[in-house]
Image (spheres, rainbow, N blue to C red):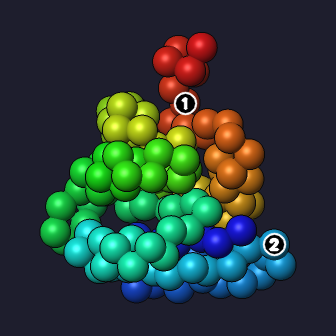
Amino acid sequence: MRIAVVDDHSIMRAVYRSLIDDSPELDMAWSASTIDEARLHIERDDIPDIIIMDVTLPDGTGYDLVREILNEYPEVPILMVSAHEERSYAEQAAECGAKGYLVKDSSPAELMDALETVISGEVYFKPSLNAQQG
């Protein structure tokens, strides 16, 4: 399973890489720190099996990039991860088509659980959007 990461913080990209490297069934496809950098990978048809996407990026919002990617590649599941714990951020993630939302203070085990859930075709939203998933 090839995973791409879009996050402007180099330490977060390193954490994701470490977690992915520790999982034999996962491979890091690529990582990007900006929307433009992510677009370059996608334009080269380097389409991963799943994308971990930050909400706040220096050249726009992750929500905009999610819409853009899903317009071209609707089958690619995207898990949004952000420092924002407010439910409205998770709601926006669901509205733009992301398959999951997780806050950055979650445990590595929860991140892996969220990835597994999203990869399997289900949705994973923390804070919970149970009323909307129903």
- What residue is at 68 percent from the left and 79 percent from the top? 27
Q: Which x, y percent locates residue 14?
A: 53, 85
Q: In which quarter of the image is residue 87?
A: top left
Q: Nearer the viewer, residue 114 or 72?
A: 72
Q: How many labels does the image show?
A: 2
> Would you place residue 97 above or below residue 80 in this image?
above
Q: Which x, y percent locates residue 10?
A: 40, 85
Identify the element where label 2 is drawn: loop
Q: Which x, y percent locates residue 78?
A: 50, 52
Q: Is residue 49 visible?
A: yes
Quadrant where the C terminus sits is top right
Identify residue type, mark 2: Glu
> Would you place residue 25 above or below residue 75 in this image?
below
Q: In which quarter of the image is residue 124?
A: top right
**Structural distance between the alpha carbons of marks 1 and 2:** 27 Å
The mark that comes first in sequence, 1 or 2, is: 2
Identify residue type, mark 1: Ser
Q: Nearer the viewer, residue 126 or 46?
A: 46
Q: How crowded is mark 1: few (under 14 residues within 10 Å), some or many (20 or more)?
A: some
* Mark nearer the viewer, 1 or 2: 2
> Is the residue under label 2 in contact with that under label 1 (CB below 8 Å)?
no
Q: Nearer the viewer, residue 110 or 75?
A: 75
Query: Which label number is shown at residue 25?
Result: 2
Q: In the image as oriented, which residue stretches furthest toward the right?
A: 24
Badge 1 is on which residue? 128
Q: In which quarter of the image is residue 21?
A: bottom right
